[in-house]
Image (tube, coloured by chain):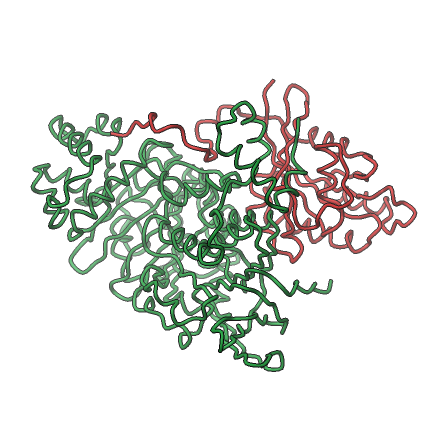
Chain colours: A red, B green
Amino acid sequence: MAIRELKVCLLGDTGVGKSSIVCRFVQDHFDHNISPTIGASFLTKTVPSGSELHKFLIWDTAGQERFHSLAPMYYRGSAAAVIVYDITKLDSFQTLKKWVKELKEHGPEDIVVAIAGNKNDLGDIREVPMKEAKEFAESIAAIFIETSARNAVNVEELFQKISKQIPPLDNPDVESTESFKLTRQPAASTRRCC
Amino acid sequence: MAAEDLPSEFDVVLVGTGLTESVVAAACARVGQRVLHLDTRTYYASKWASFTLNALLTWIDERQSPSDEVQDWSGLLQDGEEPICLSNADSASIRNVQVFCFARSAGDAEKAGPEPPRPLEAAGGKKMTFAHLLKEGRRFNIDLVSKLMYARGSLVDLLIKSNVSRYAEFKNVTRVLTYRHGNVEQVPCSRADVFASRRLSMVEKRKLMRFLASCVEEKEEEELEGELAEFLRDQQLGDNLQHFLLHSIAMVTEDTPTRDGLASTRHFLRCLGCYGNTPFLFPVYGLGEIPQCFCRMCAVFGGVYCLRHPVSCLLLDKTANRCTALIDGRGQRIASSHFVLEEGCFYVKTLPRLSSCRSISRGVLITNRSILPGDQHQVSVVTIPSLEVGLPAVRMVELSPSTMTCAPGTYLVHLTCQSQLGSAYEDLWPVVTRMFNTAQSCDQDSRPDVLWCFYFNMDDGGAGAESDGDRLPSNVYVCSGPDAELGHERAIKQAEAIFRKIVPDQDFCPPAPNPEDILYDADDPEDPANTMDKRDKDEEPAELQEQQLQVEE
């Protein structure tokens, strides 16, 4: 089966549980003490999708969102973006629109957008009604789901939904012009200069 | 939402997010220093930034109204402290900005060119208007600095060594071209090119191959007196080969000493064949990505980032000749052990600039086709020797849409030279009118049309002497801006030197652990990356955090 690498970037205010969602998805693990600023630069997980394997490269904000200083390079080449808010913090939902705008400005045009209302295990102190969030998501044609990274609710489903929305590769022959990553160089014996 | 206060104590505070500052930030955070990285601007990469077309137009408009209000924070001073005021104005180092538009205007018109606008044919036969360029504006990533990355240069080495390379993708520069006798010609530089060349005779091919092979070996010192141009003449290579070797391979001028010329020829040859058939790489989305990649690495290791953050002054403890803190534009006192600032933060009275006497002339053109049509995905570097006495030699980089720096159907052309005549327009206009079709030249030929162009001068960061820093307190370091060279050697060298002063006993940018690497390297215990990761795990708390989050499939 062909493996397709898909970059996914996470957005949302500090403390809504972006890192926790990834951590749950990739490692099926929840850590109460994730440092708010230090995260992995990206994590990967491969899931089957139809006739393909989707390898998600999930980029964390690395805390650069804290003072509204995310770099445009963060969005480059993303197939999907997950915008996270905290259902117990109305503020984090209010700023969702700001993240959508940010994505419109800097993100690729054909990006798949998913909105995740996290911490739905804390329903008793909920501040954001599900209906309102769902309607907003529909208005911007985004995927919507409420998750709980802590209780492993809907995290797998979030990424399955994203997988389904990724358009199939229309032209696999464009490889010839493709850009590449720099890696440790092969031994000097491969030199072919004159 | 009320803005959150910054933490008030760090090990290293940096102001400016240019390449040098960003490398220092990443290197320091990587070895556990607490880093605060500020920029007064709204965007990353300072003078190394790239802009969409729309953002560039806004930037051009806004820089005409610089604001630099001085506030009095004397109440925040402690005993024995004296303020060193810092500048937030970005305008002084970029001058002579001139914009011309030759694309047809449509509807809600804009800046018109000096000549009446007229329709232009874009590739695909569609008419390209300025409105169309604006509509596609976000597809442009227009760099203020035009450089290339040598495949074995210090920037590429550092990107790979530190694993920062994982944040970006690259393209090969596919052609080295030159301008001779009014024509654009391809310079054969790899073995394959040499043998495929139809311009070179069999004899020339053999001579060139023999000469290049002999260059790879180091020469005895005494053979190398004199100038490269003369040395090449003595080799009896003929006009063609002399031109190629001098201007396009050594990339030097007639009066460069032989020793330096041969050293740069060797560097060129050493970089060939690593990734493609030219020695150069270019980052997808433009050079402005590279500082951002180092900033991300810094953030991953706990660095705190804050753009649009004005700074007010540094506080100097006169008896110790050290700075104790930075006062920001809001009057917050931020204590730190080290301060790294871009040159532009200092007023000239604090840090006299040798560099201001030399500047780089830059031109940026949006054109409708390549200067040497061929495969549409070409990325070319063009060396243009001085057209006539008194005019500078110009370096041109032509980027195709495959680099994600310009819209489909357009090309982005960067021109760079050492300023000779005063303004970038004066330095570069002769080259532009000869090689391109503008509203001012007649359109009888196949030269590409210029749709829009932009000229400016920038201080040459390579002109200042390294000893400038002597006038500053011992824990304050200055990063000079971009220089006129093609490569990035100076910026990387300066970043490493600053890092060594801040943390003398630590490794410079050791590889960051990568989940992929750990899995991939598992069966190869010899790999240095792998052993490095293991060692780091025991040493650094920042590292531990990252390790905890890594995948084990």
Q: Is residue B490 above or below residue B93?
A: above
Total label count?
Answer: 0
Image quarter for residue A122?
top right
- Choose between B453 and B457: the one closer to the eye: B457
Residue A145 in the image: x percent, y percent? 79, 38
- Choose between A57 and B498: the one closer to the eye: B498
Asked whether, in this view, residue B384 is left or right of residue B545, the answer is left
Residue B181 in the image: x percent, y percent? 17, 44
Asked whether, in this view, residue A89 is left or right of residue B436, the answer is right
Image quarter for residue B331?
bottom right
- Choose between A146 and B28: the one closer to the eye: B28
Asked whether, in this view, residue B207 is left or right of residue B111, the answer is left
Residue B106 visible at all:
no
Image quarter for residue B461?
bottom left
Residue B242 in the image: x percent, y percent? 14, 41
Asked whether, in this view, residue B72 is left or right of residue A144, the answer is left
Residue positioned 27% across, 36% down in the render: B269
Q: Image quadrant for the C terminus of chain A? A: top left
Residue B508 visible at all:
yes
Q: Image quadrant for the N terminus of chain A? A: top right
**Residue furthest out toward the right:** A124
Residue A102 in the image: x percent, y percent? 64, 51
